[in-house]
Amino acid sequence: MLELDLSADIQALRSTFSDIRAVVDVDGLRADIARLSEQAGAPDLWDDPEAAQKVTSALSHSQSDLARVDAIERRLDDLEVLVELAREMEDEESADEARRELAALGEAIGQLEVQTLLDGEYDSRSAVVTIRSGAGGDDATDFAEMLMRMYLRWAERHKYPVKVMDTSYAEGAGIKSATFEIDAPYAYGTLSVEAGTHRLARISPFGSADKRQTSFAAVEVIPVMEEAVEVDIPEGDIRVDVFRSSGPGGQSVNTTDSAVRLTHLPTGIVVSMQNEKSQIQNRAAAMRVLQTRLLLLKREEEAAKKKELAGVITASWGDQMRSYFLYGQQLVKDLRTGHEVGNPAVVFDGDLDGFIAAGIRWRKRKDDD
């Protein structure tokens, strides 16, 4: 007789999912979709393209959130039916399918549960990610490019749209820096735990002697701001440089000097953009990113001041947050959470969800302490 009693496991998943549904506020989500759909259907919507983009983007994100919740609820219902059929037919193949679906649902609900922990002011927004090579010469610039590919593959796995906004190629291997936008609900809250210093240790493919080389790259993650009205930047505080976009090895990809680099003189913050076709568009995009960085810097300074006044001074949790070992014992280890994977190849191919979930839970515990 077929033994298949998954009722306790399914009930546990339903209980967790019920809590998630309450946090997500499905009824409120449906109301938002109805309101945004009405706005999106207005005949004069595209008279203001920027406002129209905000409406359609918000509608798409809300519909995506609701679809994810509804899909899990349907899968739970289907799983119970599958278990019942497997019992009645004593079908071992259906039983195996039910066990696999139970495990997959557990993972999907776990990921959705992590998203409910993203309750920061900007967590629901899309993200702009910047990667910069650090110490380590060609190994560092190569590592920076490996990280860029890792995050692009992660986005691809989740079917998130990506727009590369700027890439500065190194003279040797890899890149000096790159900036790209990931347009997805909660992309900022999700990827913000990836910010910090990443360290790579391996036998260098660029050296003549087979010596271990340690190199570093920094990852910065900021939210996409609809508008940064809180930051007023005097024109005299900005230096504007215009240059020609370039590809690997310095090859020109534009026939005009359309790329723009903004330097905020008081802070030294530099933002480059070359994705758009016109200089005006690149400058506007760069200004939005600069305003966001200055806004976040201001808030970080205010938070640090409050901690100092309270007598609590702690180092940034993001510094040197993960190590990648590509020699001897192959390993990727997060130094904050202890989460590790013994196959670096799958991590560099975009399998980051375990690290991200552990990071979000770790951050929540730190915030609650």
Image (tube, helix red, strand yellow):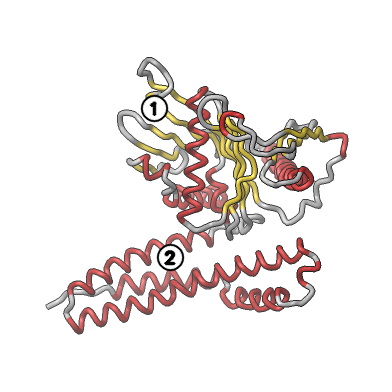
As measured in the structure, the alpha-carbon distance from the residue carrying label 1 to the one carrying label 2 is 36 Å
What amino acid is found at the position of numbered circle 1 in the picture?
A: Arg
Which-is-in-front pick, marks 1 and 2?
1
Count the labels in the image: 2
Residue 342 place in picture, x, y as percent: 33, 41
- Residue 259 vs residue 97, the one in the foreground: 259
Q: Residue lying farthest top? A: 209
Q: Which residue is disc 1 drawn over?
A: 202
Task: Name the residue at 76% across, 36% down.
Answer: 262
Task: Name the residue at 48% across, 75% down.
Answer: 70
- Residue 162 vs residue 131, the one in the foreground: 162
Determine whether label 1 and label 2 are within 8 Å by CB.
Answer: no
Q: Which residue is disc 2 drawn over?
A: 109
Task: Name the residue at 43% across, 69% down.
Answer: 16
The answer to whether residue 254 is seen in the rendering is: yes
Residue 348 place in picture, x, y as percent: 42, 42
Q: Quadrant of the N terminus?
A: bottom left
- Residue 316 vs residue 105, the one in the foreground: 105
Task: Name the residue at 68% across, 39% down.
Answer: 254
Is residue 71 shown above or below 235?
Answer: below
Q: Residue lying farthest bottom? A: 88
Residue 328 place in picture, x, y as percent: 30, 29
